[in-house]
Amino acid sequence: MDKVKVLIVDDHPIVRSGLAGEIAKTSDITVVAEASDGDDAIAKVRTFAPDLVLLDIALPGKNGLEVLKQIQAEAPHIKVLMLSAFSEKQYAVRCLKNGAIGYLTKKSAPEELISAIRKVMRGRRYVSASLAELLALEIGTDNNQLPHEILSDREFQVLCLIGQGNTVTQIAQILSLSVSTVNTYRAHVLEKMNMETSAQLIRYVLDNNLADI
């Protein structure tokens, strides 16, 4: 049987090295390439055609959610396993809804990573016990959602960028959108989250540890 080909996407060299080292201990999985940002990740997906992408969320340029959606659009047969420093409660459900096959935090033990890769390559999803509980609670409990969880993916991006201190003009440049479009998204975010100012949004982002996305 051919080895599972893995692309590691993380902006920290030490993290990529550690992940590659763990995978190198196996006989059935191999790292075919590494990428340090979102654009590099998409380029490596096209070049190396991996079976599975280990994808961080917080990346320079395109963030992990954007990369995930682009992989789904271009190569839906490639499995994407999110591996992030963010807690499951913050991003896991959103990632899974966008097509990720599983979600691991970077606090996970190395053997859990290998187990997760093997499980998803058998056609199953990988979720921890705590994430399974979150997913169960997600079903039919929209009234219990946190305010940012009701945002669309683009609205969520705009919220996070506002929380990082970016102006509307800067956000427009980052997302390649017009200023008026970003203002529209900002207005939708304020309305959905029942807030009135960007300062309130910034405080919310900081309080909920969303600023690094």
Image: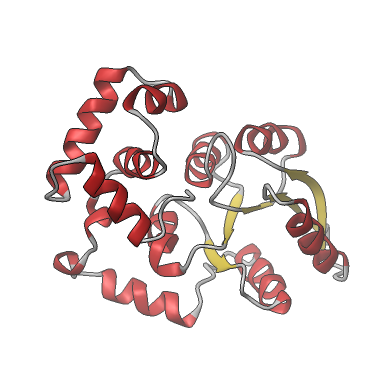
Q: How many marks?
A: 0
Q: Is residue 177 left or right of residue 125?
A: left
Q: Is residue 95 left or right of residue 77?
A: left
Q: Position of residue 213 (x, y in %)?
A: 47, 48
Q: Is residue 69 left or right of residue 178?
A: right
Q: Position of residue 132 (x, y in %)?
A: 41, 77
Q: Position of residue 155 (x, y in %)?
A: 29, 40
Q: Give above or below for 37 relative to 18.
A: above
Which residue occupies the extreme front position in the image?
Answer: 199
Residue 35, by quadrant, is top right
Q: Residue at x 22, y 57 (%)?
A: 147
Q: Give above or below for 168 relative to 101.
A: above
Residue 97, by quadrant, is bottom left
- Quadrant location of the N terminus? bottom right
Q: Residue at x 73, y 59 (%)?
A: 15
Q: Residue at x 66, y 77 (%)?
A: 112
Which one is in front, 87 or 30?
87
Which one is in front, 198 or 115?
198
- What colour scheme does the image use? secondary structure
Q: Give above or below for 128 relative to 51.
A: below
